[in-house]
Amino acid sequence: MILIFQLSLWNILLDNDKISITTSTLICHFFWSILLNTDTKNHTVPERLLGKIMILCFIIFVFNYIIFSPSTLFLPIIEPLFQYAGLLGYPLFYIYMRLLTVDDKITFKVHARYLFIPTLLFLLYVSAILCTPFEEYQKWLLDRNNYHSSFFGIHFLGFIFMMIRITLIVQIIATVIGNHILLKKYGYKTLQYYSDLNDVGVTKVKLLNWILIILGVVGIIWDILCRSYFMHETTSVFPKLISIFISATSSIMLFILGWIGLRQKLLNPTFEIEPEEIPQVNKRIDATQKKILHKILVLFNDHKIYLDDNLTILDVAKSVGTNRTYISSIINQQYNQNFCTFVNSFRVDELERVIKENPSYTLDQLSESCGFGTVHSMKRAIITKKQQPFSEWRRENLPS
């Protein structure tokens, strides 16, 4: 709804001034900030941090509005804060990714180091401003790509600003690589925890990396062109098109980021495993493990626990009276499957029975009656186990 509202605003404002485009984006991100920070008690730690990241994005758009407005009254004050807010975005998103995979909460000891360089650059930037006469600083700010001066402060400002640009590029690369490493190391754990294939959202999280790259590129373009380019009257058409493109791209990417983020469950819900919990991995399961396996099979064959579409490995562990690590280890050793695949194999067998007894069932009825969270999860389970498309498999299993 927010995205449609913004697109309509862009359409209305195409013939108006450039600042109106930024205004429409600003309004929409205000709604995002409100939407993503309500009912926080029911949100996970990563979701709460994502809400704060969206507030930061809103603040950046507020600063952006002021910086690119005709008035220059607040520009000298806003500029360093705008740069600092921009530098915080990528480190915070890496912390968000760590909260999905390896960290269970935000701590100063673990996460402050990711914010150290942005804070240091901000302080150096402020120091350079204080070392520069206000009139010189203001002239440089209005046209920093073309303004030249012999003042030391101006050279210092130019150097720090160049370091900010370089740091932003390094942040984009480091965040994308760091996120990839975290996904590669911990992404598989979702298959050991959730039973609903929709909860295995590694692909969606990988998409977030591409969003980060796109946001970084448009942000760098916007920053390099700077205020003087967009406010120059003799080039009013092309700058307007660029501002519309950057505004639209940024808003759509942030919309997707928020939409995915608020639906993304923890990739590693159990985080670290205590050493004493990890059983010895043998080719054969021992007597104790056989008893646990028997209890698991009773739950699945007799009680049909797999019909619960929200079933997790912790639910099974509590019912059996052991810990999740033993459950995962036994399933892996005995069936060479992860927890998700194990549960969905029972659901597929159930689906095969239901579809023969009730050939008129709709896809929604089939997925609901067999424990799949969604029709999409049901189709993916068929592809995974039967190695054929759902429609083809269904035709083969319908009674003649």
Image: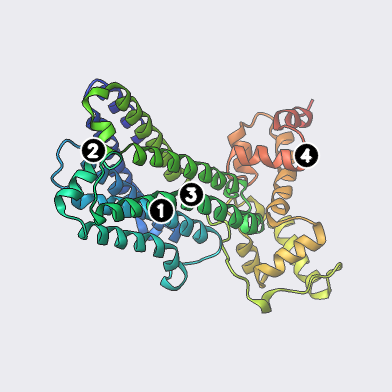
Marks 2 and 3, how far apart at CA:
24 Å
Residue 272 locus on image (x, y percent): 59, 70
Question: Residue 107 placed where, x, y %?
Answer: 43, 70
Query: Residue 68 — which label?
Result: 2
Q: Is residue 244 left or right of residue 356?
A: left
Q: Determine whether 353 is above or below 310 in the image.
A: above
Q: Which mark is in front, 4 or 3?
A: 3
User: Which image quarter: residue 243?
Assistant: top left
Q: Considering the numbered disc 2 on the image, is that residue within a helix, a strand or a loop?
A: loop
Residue beneath the point at 66% across and 58% down? 192
Mark 3, residue position: 172
Label 4 crowding class (10 Å Cα cut-off): few <14, some 14-19, many 20+?
few
The amino acid sitting under disc 2 is Phe
- For the residues labelled 1 and 4, the Cα–Cα distance comes to 38 Å
> How many residues crowd mark 2 within 10 Å: few (<14), some (14–19), many (20+)?
some
User: What residue occupies the far front of the structure in this picture?
Assistant: 150
User: Which residue lies most toward the right here?
Assistant: 284
* Residue bearing the label numbered 4: 386
Image quadrant where one finds the N terminus: top left
Give the residue type at disc 1: Leu
